[in-house]
Image (cartoon, grey):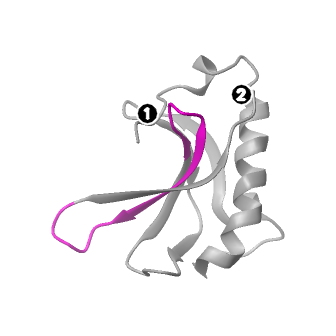
Amino acid sequence: MKKIKEWFDIMNDVEEIIEQAIKAFKKWYKANITITHGSGRDVVEIFGLPYTSTSEWAGLWNCQGEAYLNEDPQWKFNCLAISEDMEILADFDREDTGHFDNKDIVIGRIEL
């Protein structure tokens, strides 16, 4: 899945995209990840999730919590991203293999 580099390319109202991504994550995360560090009343307090665009892709980045995928705990939650097909992705990293691995899970879809 190719991720979008800049969410402003989807629509001018990036706040609407952010709201949709966070709403999808709120529905998905409790049943699918285990938080090992971080607390708060909602996902923004737990993970931070500021919007940042990088040279590879834009996302809502986990900058303060730590959480792992329930089905395979070697995968650490990294960010929320949007694919070119408008899918909302939960992005996970695995670094214990000697090289950087990345896994994306579709958790919703952006409605334009």
For the C terminus, the quadrant is top right
In this picture, is 31 found above or below 87? below
In this picture, is 98 found above or below 9? below
Indicate the position of residue 76 as horizontal and vertical percent values.
45, 70
Identify which residue, 18 or 70, lies in the foreground: 70
Residue 54 is marked as: 1
Helix, strand or loop at label 1? It is loop
Indicate the position of residue 10 as horizontal and vertical percent values.
63, 21
Q: Residue furthest left?
A: 98
Indicate the position of residue 2 as horizontal and vertical percent values.
40, 36
For the N terminus, the quadrant is top left
In this picture, is 87 found above or below 46? above
Q: For the point 55% across and 36% down, which residue is it?
A: 52
Q: Which residue is mark 2?
A: 14
Mark 1 vs mark 2: in front: 2
Indicate the position of residue 77 as horizontal and vertical percent values.
50, 65
Q: Amino acid at mark 2?
A: Val
Q: Amino acid at mark 1?
A: Thr
Q: Quadrant of residue 3?
A: top left
